[in-house]
Image (cartoon, rainbow, N blue to C red):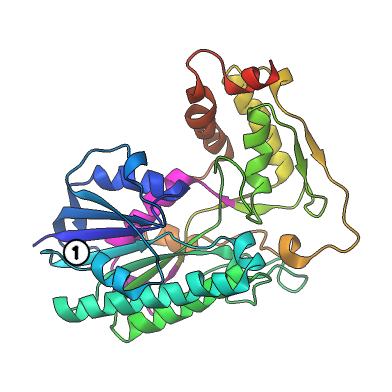
Amino acid sequence: MCIKVVVLGAGGLVGERLIDALVAKTTFRVGGGLALPLSKIVLFDMRDLSADLKVSDPRVSCVAGDLTDRRTLDKLFDPDGCTRVTVIQLAALLSGYAEANFELGMKVNLHGAIGVMDALRAVGDKLGGPQIYLFTSTDYVAAYNEDNKAAPVSEESFRLSPVSYGVQKACVELLLCDYSRKGFIDGRVGRLSAVLGRPGWSNSISWSYTGIFTQPLIGKDFEVPGVLPMDRPFPCSCVQNNVASLLYLASEVRGADLGHNRVVQIAAKSYTLSEIWAACQKVAAAAGIAADTLGKVTQGALPKEATVTELNVCPAVDCAKAEALGMPMEVDIETIIADYVARHVKKEEEGEPEAKRQKA
């Protein structure tokens, strides 16, 4: 008896850390039960990750392809001699891109996930029982407005999202719960809040909450869009805690403990842009990055017609269910920024921080 774990969308920020955590494991539990030898780890993405892979492990293989192609999924999920298959889906067309290209967002985020569930259902039929499918969702499934701004978003929140990305994710959440109720799969949803610390630029609604520290730390000025108030709280999550939580949800939690609603809001904490910028300056000082080398942060002008895209996101999330399940709850903005500095600023060059080099 052994288990195969397939990671869909392994090339992103969370995927990179998830790979390291998976490779460190020799066994993997099945829904809080028996710990099976972890025999195969398959990393799937649109591009071949082999060249970028930092681990050397005979259990690991990389596959590039189209998430929406059923033949590709059937090959990926083939048990290949294992008695269990667990699928962790990180792959998605992110918020800004899904909003700009409705058809592609529907294809990847909704129909792609349905295809994954159908393919894994077929594997369960072969192996004699439902296989575990962990789908990563978002707190964008819920809207922020005058009627609900005082109520944090919880697993019971299925409010009308102001963005297509959130609507697509909400549809998958509901379908996954029904697929699980029917016994087709053993599904779990890990709802992630904005994951801070993504290097480079991203067309994501939440990118300002990352850009406000990643850009100044490399000496670049950053303008906060005028539509985003500096004092508006926004739920933020930590990549290390997300990885630990997702693996816990995929392996240590019994489906019966989740009940009919298979959604779990992963730990997050709300911060304002002002708080994140203050934390950035504090962490930079502790890391020996001179204050005069940091880029400047300014606020852009408020557009005449502000869209709901940036404004109507939830200000807080309720993580009580995750805590009750024993999942990790460690989210701290200074720790998030310090991790970014260690990985992407100090690491660029042994001697001088990147911030100083860019100002020179």
x and y percent of residue 73 in the render? Answer: 31, 70
Q: Quadrant of residue 279?
A: top right
- Judged by its main secondary structure, the magenta piece is helix
Q: Quadrant of residue 256?
A: bottom left
Residue drawn at point x = 82 percent, y = 42 percent: 299
254 in magenta? yes
Q: What amino acid is found at the position of numbered circle 1 in the picture?
A: Gly
In the rendered image, the quadrant that contains the C terminus is top right
Q: Quick check: 144 left or right of 177? A: right
Residue drawn at point x = 43 percent, y = 73 percent: 112
Taking 307 as reference, is 329 above or below it? above
Q: Quick check: 5 left or right of 128? A: right
x and y percent of residue 216 in the render? Answer: 68, 31
Residue drawn at point x = 49 percent, y = 54 percent: 267
Q: Which residue is mark 1?
A: 33
Instruction: Pick out the residue farthest to the bottom.
Output: 182
Residue 170 visible, this orientation: yes
66 in magenta? no
x and y percent of residue 302 in the render? Answer: 87, 53
Q: Quick check: 150 left or right of 340? A: right
Which element type, helix, strand or loop, lies under badge 1?
A: loop
Instruction: Pick out the residue farthest to the left.
Output: 1
**Residues in magenta, as a range:** 236-263
